[in-house]
């Protein structure tokens, strides 16, 4: 299924993001079981953030064998996705509790900054899989 040895690091991140998505789904199911019929869409769909934010792009990169992100860009991207996931879970807990909080928006801003930074670092680093043309 996975052919290139250069993709092993990315494959580990892919498996980790799938496990994170499964954990979020399980956490939401258990949390809402004890919430007395109150539910939040932020809690229900928190698993989608690591699934679409990490699993989908990583699997596309692995299967197409394109430019593999360096360690810094992967860490920034994963930090952004983790921040967005935790923000979704916190928003869900706050909604189930029945209150509001204006500071939850910080999770979205910080997550977006991390993801954009990771993407910029990925685009600015030279590819280790592509060979340069002789002069």
Image (cartoon, rainbow, N blue to C red):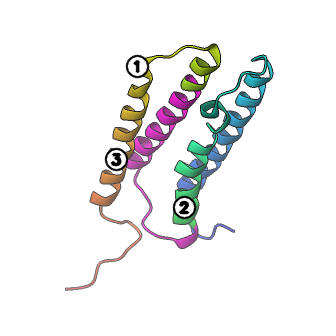
Q: Are marks 3 and 1 in contact (CB under 8 Å)?
A: no
Q: Residues within 10 Å of mark 1 (few under 14, many from 20)?
A: few
Magenta segment range? 63-90
User: Is label 3 in a helix, a strand or a loop?
Assistant: helix
For residue 49, the mark is none
Q: Quadrant of the N terminus?
A: bottom right
- Residue 25: horizontal and vertical position, in percent? 71, 36
Which residue appears farthest toward the bottom when viewing the image? Answer: 135
Which residue appears farthest toward the left when viewing the image? Answer: 135
Residue nearest the observer in this picture, 117 or 35? 35
Q: Quadrant of the C terminus?
A: bottom left
Q: Quadrant of residue 56?
A: bottom right
User: For the residues carrying marks 2 and 3, which lies nearer the camera in this image?
Assistant: 3
Q: Is residue 21 above or below residue 96?
A: below
For residue 7, the mark is 2
The residue identified by callout 3 is 116
Q: Residues within 10 Å of mark 3 (few under 14, many from 20)?
A: some
First in sequence: mark 3 vs mark 1: 1
């Amino acid at each position: 299924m996975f052919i290139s040895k250069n993709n092993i690091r990315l494959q580990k991140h892919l498996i980790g993001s799938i496990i994170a998505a499964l954990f979020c789904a399980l956490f939401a199911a258990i949390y809402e079981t004890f919430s007395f019929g109150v539910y939040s869409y932020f809690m229900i769909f928190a698993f989608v953030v690591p699934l679409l934010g990490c699993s989908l792009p990583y699997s596309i990169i692995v299967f197409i064998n394109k430019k593999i992100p360096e360690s810094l860009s992967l860490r920034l991207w994963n930090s952004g996705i983790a921040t967005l996931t935790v923000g979704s879970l916190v928003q869900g807990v706050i909604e189930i509790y029945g209150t509001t909080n204006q500071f939850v928006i910080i999770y979205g801003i910080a997550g977006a900054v991390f993801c954009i930074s990771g993407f910029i670092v990925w685009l600015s680093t030279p590819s280790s899989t592509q060979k340069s043309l002789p002069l």
